[in-house]
Image (cartoon, rainbow, N blue to C red):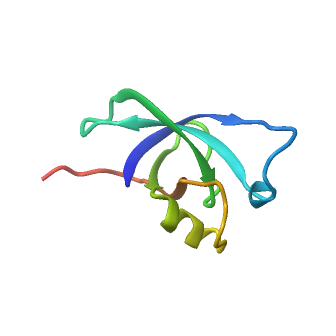
Amino acid sequence: MFIGRVSGSVTATIKHEAFHSYKLLIVDHLDLHGKATGAYDICVDVVQAGVGDTVLVLDEGNGARQILNRSVAPVRAVVVGVVDSVDLI
């Protein structure tokens, strides 16, 4: 899992049927201080996140398929939550 910030969306005229009811978002990875690291993932959105939102991403294929309730799907990363705040201890 990682915390990221939504920087955009992906539009596809043809996509796998597993994605038909979901948005695809570009999510930039954030470091512990909230700064973008330069890495990003294209994630399936199941929580209605939007550009600029800080999100929690599950970045593991089997868990992602379980969230989508599919045994087979070409998915690895899923936005599973919108983050309100992060406190470092």
Q: Residue furthest top?
A: 38
In the image, is residue 6 above or below residue 89?
above
**Residue at point 49%, 67% (across, down):** 63
- Residue 74, percent from left and from top: 65, 54
The image quadrant that residue 36 belongs to is: top left
Q: Residue furthest left?
A: 89
Q: What count of labels does the image hold?
A: 0
- Residue 88, percent from left and from top: 18, 49
**Residue at point 29%, 50% (across, down):** 86
Does residue 66 appear to the left or right of 12 in the view shown? left
The image quadrant that residue 67 belongs to is: bottom right
- Residue 82, percent from left and from top: 49, 55
**Residue at point 48%, 34% (across, down):** 40
The image quadrant that residue 10 belongs to is: top right
Q: Residue furthest right?
A: 13
Closer-to-camera residue (47/28): 28
Closer-to-camera residue (9/61): 61
- Residue 30, percent from left and from top: 36, 36
Quadrant of the snapshot with the N terminus: bottom left
